[in-house]
Amino acid sequence: DSVFASVVRAPEDPILGVTVAYNKDTSPNKLNLGVGAYRTEEGKPLVLNVVRKAEQHLVNDKSQIKEYLPIVGLADFNKLSAKLIFGADSPAIQQNRVTTVQCLSGTGSLRVGAEFLAKHYHQRTIYIPTPTWGNHPKIFNLAGLSVKTYRYYDPATRGLNFQGLLEDLGAAPSGAIVLLHACAHNPTGVDPTLAQWEQIRQLMRSKGLLPFFDSAYQGFASGNLDADAQPVRTFVADGGECLAAQSYAKNMGLYGERVGALSIVCKTQDVASRVESQLKLVIRPMYSNPPIHGASIVATILKDSNMYNEWTVELKAMADRIISMRQQLYDALSAKGTPGDWSHIIKQIGMFTFTGLNSEQVAFMTKEYHIYMTSDGRISMAGLSSRTVPHLTDAIHAAVT
Ligand code: PLP
């Protein structure tokens, strides 16, 4: 008998498991709105032209070698990533009080940040919004932090529960860590306004709460990289400290390259360099040092003004297609006279719409219409196209009537 005979089967991941089920479906009408990955109008994955160009450039550059990167990753990549999120003119960067380390996409950046906090920060409680990306509680728990929640989404308005958020953060113990989605909140698509962000900032700073930004969608929400980074930048502008986990999965379409960065903004250059020395001790026994290819692509694009501009155009096109899908779905439901208020579809921001459909309605749509999504009713707008909007509209209509 196997020495592993007592191992019990684990459930599929709630998000990635949707794709597993989708792949088994043989219907020609099947539609995968589960995973958060961009698709073209034709339903195909997209490699950005500027990424192909950067890869070509790397292939032709004979100085490119395959040696190990340092523990903290590619130096150019780290500098340029900090500039991208905090702004080229950020005083924190100019004062050398930001440490940035290359990590394995957004997930790896969150994990390294969490491991560092669990070892070196005095308050080991992190507050995450309800709901949030399903991986958040697991990442923080396994790193050794104690996970608590703050109210975020109001099902009644399908918008922000701002009062609940302020109450819960107001009641958090001094020094607690707070996970904030930098923009395009997943799964709800609901973001605070800039005025609300300002109130959140004042409350958090007055209570000494430590902001940990998860920035997985910079540029994907509005189509503008600077606009989407504005909430993060207002927290850095006040001179206080914070952490930020960046992912290039969505905004550069580099999903499988696993390229991201963790930045920690500190009060002084001296603190930042000590923090970095400890980040190295977190990373070295976990995966030694990060992979070189994806970070080289990003650095090549970010340091060349032509390629950078080309990227912003392609990024805006992705964001615009998603915004147009929102409008098309909303218009189709209105035209069909589907009962209910569907205006949240055009109000919500980013890759996902939190439809308000319950798990039974979702199961019905999967069974009868071969449409796949997470059981909380979240649909990836990027998986939708003009061709498939009518099918989804019919399914939603049937599910709610
Ligand atoms: N954070 C949020 C809120 C996300 O939605 C995602 C991806 O779906 C991530 C982080 C991390 O993704 P990755 O590790 O692929 O960069």
Image: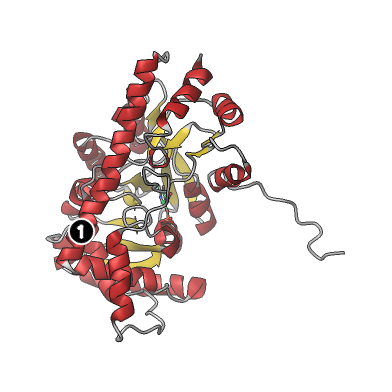
Amino acid at the residue labelled 1: Glu
Q: Nearer the viewer, residue 60 or 347?
A: 60
Identify the residue at horizontal 59%, vertical 37% (top origin).
27
- As displayed, is residue 44 above or below residue 365? below
Q: Is residue 224 left or right of residue 189?
A: left
Q: Residue at x 18, y 50 (%)?
A: 226
Q: Quadrant of residue 64?
A: bottom left
Ligand 1 within 8 Å, label 1 CB:
no
Given residues 238 and 297, the one toward you in this image is: 297
Label 1 packing within 10 angstroms: few (<14), some (14-19), many (20+) = some
The correct choice, above or below, for 209 with respect to 335 in the image is below
Residue 152 position (above or below residue 313): above
Residue at x 42% of width, y 38% of height: 187
Residue 51: horizontal and vertical position, in percent? 31, 64
Residue 289: x %, y % from top left: 43, 75
The residue where tag 1 is placed is 310
Q: Is residue 80 left or right of residue 372?
A: left
Dot 1: element: helix
Q: Residue furthest right?
A: 1
x, y percent for residue 360? 58, 25
Residue 49's image quarter?
bottom left
**Nearest the camera: 83 or 26?**
26
- Which quadrant of the structure image shows residue 122? bottom left
For the N terminus, give its image quadrant: bottom right
Measured as percent of width and height from the top left, residue 280 is found at 40, 74
